[in-house]
Amino acid sequence: MDLHTHIWEAFNFQPPSLSIAEKVIARIKESGIDGIAITDHHNWEWGVELGELIEENFPGEVIIIPGWEVEVRPPSNPFDEYQVSELLLPEGGVFRIYCHPGYYSPNIVIEENVHAIEIDNYGHNWHIRKQQVREVADAHSLMTLEVSDAHVLENVGVRYSEVELEELYRRAMPRDLWQG
């Protein structure tokens, strides 16, 4: 799956439609992946709506996990701001991914309820120090992910990770702790 995409942005912030759904499904299948997480900036509702539209009209075709990407300023040092994708899992949990480590701050601050970290990001790879990310992931038992961070449909699936949904569910925090 490609767990970091910006599909709303890729479609110029249009409302979800069957036409958009068909194009997204086609791109997912062309990429040879099973599905995507839609992690647009500060908007989880759009991904929920597109996911419901796809499930209603194209049941079982692809997996769509809605979510969003937000900024976090850790209380320990607000200058170590980072982005996190929060995936709203169908089983009710929230799976949190530390996005493009090294972007904004070279420090990687892992707070409670971060479950994974990007080690390869097609759109932001130039600043990811992979050895540092591996060490942080090992120290905090984080999954390492490869993602596209696609802002255009053609980039969906250019990077992806082999993941088991059950593993995301197992690591996720309960939805009632989510502050979205």
Image (spheres, rainbow, N blue to C red):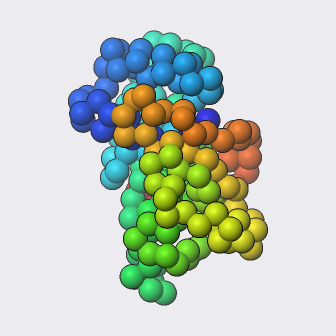
Toward the viewer: 42 or 89?
Answer: 42
Q: What is the x, y in percent for residue 71?
A: 39, 65
**Which residue does the image show at 29% across and 30% down from the upper left?**
11
Q: What residue is rendered at 39% in x and 59% in y?
A: 70
> Which of the two residues, 34 or 75, is positioned nearer the viewer here?
34
At horizontal 45% and vertical 34% (from top left) the residue drawn is 155
Identify which residue, 66 or 154, lies in the foreground: 154
Residue 116 placement, left or right of 66: right
The spot of residue 45 in percent (x, y) is 35, 40
Q: Is residue 10 left or right of residue 163?
A: left
- 157 vs 130, left or right, is left
Q: Is residue 45 left or right of residue 144?
A: left
Numbered circles on residues, count: 0
Identify the residue at image location x=32%, y=34%. 10
Q: What is the residue that sits farthest to the bottom in this orientation? A: 76
Q: For the N terminus, give its image quadrant.
A: top right
Expressed as whole percent of the image width and height from the top left, the position of residue 67 reads: 46, 45
- Name the image quarter holding residue 104: bottom left
Q: Is residue 77 above or below residue 104?
A: below
Q: Is residue 79 above or below residue 121?
A: below
Residue 177 in view of the camera? no
Query: Can the viewer see residue 180 in this picture?
Result: yes
Instruction: Give the image location of residue 175, x and y in percent.
Output: 54, 53
Corner quadrant of residue 17: top left
Give the residue at the far front of this rendering. Answer: 126
Q: Hey, which quadrant is residue 89 in on the image?
A: top right
Q: Quadrant of the C terminus?
A: bottom left
Q: In the rendered view, would you say 85 is above or below 154?
A: below
